[in-house]
Amino acid sequence: MNFHIVTLFPEAFSSYLATSILKRALERGQIKIYFYNPRDFTDDPHRRVDRRPYGGGPGMVLQAEAILRAVRRAVGKKRDVKILILSPRGKQFDNAGARILARRYRHIILIAGHYEGIDARVKKALRAEEISIGPYVLTGGELPAMAIIDAVSRQIPGVLGKGESLEEERIASREVYTRPESFRIGKKTYRVPKILLSGDHKKIDAWKNAH
């Protein structure tokens, strides 16, 4: 899987991609991530890519041309490409969507907006899909892009090791416990539920489904 990120702030991804499962997936070549800064695709001598919106309104809007050039570079002659614009107005992203992306496409282009948004002609020119990670507004599309990279990467065979590592593919309770079996805080003792220590896997599975 190849992720192509169009963003003004590629440095925002450094820490997250350098840790844990995504770091190992990158090192193994299971995923690859490329960055395209719109500032590198503008003719403006000051590398400016934002302007005030036509019709008035607050803030600044990212210009279409630099983003379209960046996406053109990302797409090249590739096939199996999906272009997504991160937007609070987009379709709600979920685990089913992550599975579809992982199974149908080899290249995912994520356009991270900023300020008051992106010139609407970008979506029209690319026939891109707007997608949101939740019913709230963030200052930019970088965090949503990271969330999508993480969710999709988990669906790629081998990234998590064994298939049963996927929470949605196994019986998992909202309540999980580990050692020690009991501990005391103040005057109260907290214990692991006895059923989990019973060794009766049928009863344990039933307990997990109920909790």
Image (cartoon, rainbow, N blue to C red):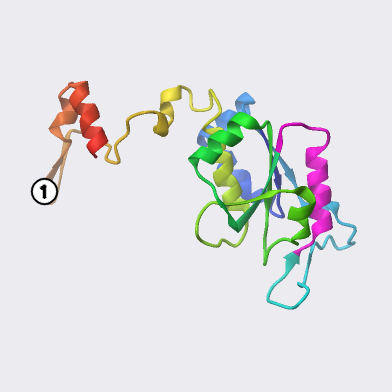
Label total for image: 1
Q: On the rendered structure, is 134 left or right of 193?
A: right
Q: Residue at x 72, y 32 (%)?
A: 80
> Viewer-proximal residue, 202 or 38?
202
Q: Residue at x 21, y 33 (%)?
A: 207
Could you say where residue 52 lies in the image, as x and y percent from the top left? 77, 72
Q: Quadrant of the N terminus?
A: top right
Instruction: Work out whether 4 lies above or below 62.
Output: above
Instruction: Work out whether 8 lies above or below 164.
Output: below
Residue extent of the magenta highlight:
62-81
Could you say where residue 192 lies in the image, as x and y percent from the top left? 18, 36
Instruction: Work out whether 69 lies above or below 3.
Output: below
Q: Is residue 46 visible?
A: yes
Q: Which residue is mark 1?
A: 188
Q: Which secondary structure is most common in the magenta stretch?
A: helix
Could you say where residue 54 lies in the image, as x and y percent from the top left? 78, 73
